[in-house]
Image (tube, helix red, strand yellow):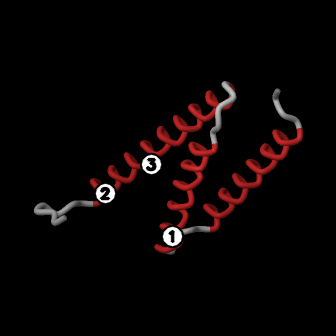
Amino acid sequence: MMNLVPRDEREAAVDSAADRLSFLVLAYGVLVIAAIRSLNGEATWDLLGLVVLAGVVGLGFRLRQRVVSNRWATVLIATVAIAAVFAALLAAFPLR
């Protein structure tokens, strides 16, 4: 698609902020729906897989553009480690 009017940095920053906010709302909304499904005894793998896939796509894009900083990588590793600990605890001590 061709832009007829050149975009400035402010518009690009606003677009990025809007995309970031909409992703957060979508991701946490899907996680809430997955939690509700889980409490009702329904399968949640499809919704959780969708959230994980979205994160992997974002990571792949950042790696391809070479914009992954040390701080970003540290936050990613800490998040994965914390999620793994919680998953292990939930597997070892089910809520039901």
Secondary structure at numbered mark 3: helix
What is the quadrant of the C terminus in the image?
top right
3 horizontally vs 63: left or right: left
Q: CA distance from mark 2 to mark 1?
A: 17 Å
Q: Earlier in the sequence, mark 3 or mark 1?
A: 3
Q: Earlier in the sequence, mark 2 or mark 1?
A: 2
Quarter of the image holding residue 5? Answer: bottom left
What is the quadrant of the N terminus in the image?
bottom left
Which x, y percent locates residue 51?
56, 48
Q: Which residue is mark 2?
A: 12
Q: Amino acid at mark 3?
A: Arg
Q: Which residue is mark 3?
A: 20
Q: Nearer the viewer, residue 94 or 23?
A: 94
Q: Which residue is mark 1?
A: 67
Q: Nearer the viewer, residue 21 or 32?
A: 32
Which x, y percent locates residue 52?
59, 52
71 horizontally vs 59: left or right: right
9 horizontally vs 28: left or right: left
For the point 58% across and 32% down, which residue is it?
A: 32
Which x, y percent locates residue 14?
33, 49
Which x, y percent locates residue 38?
67, 31
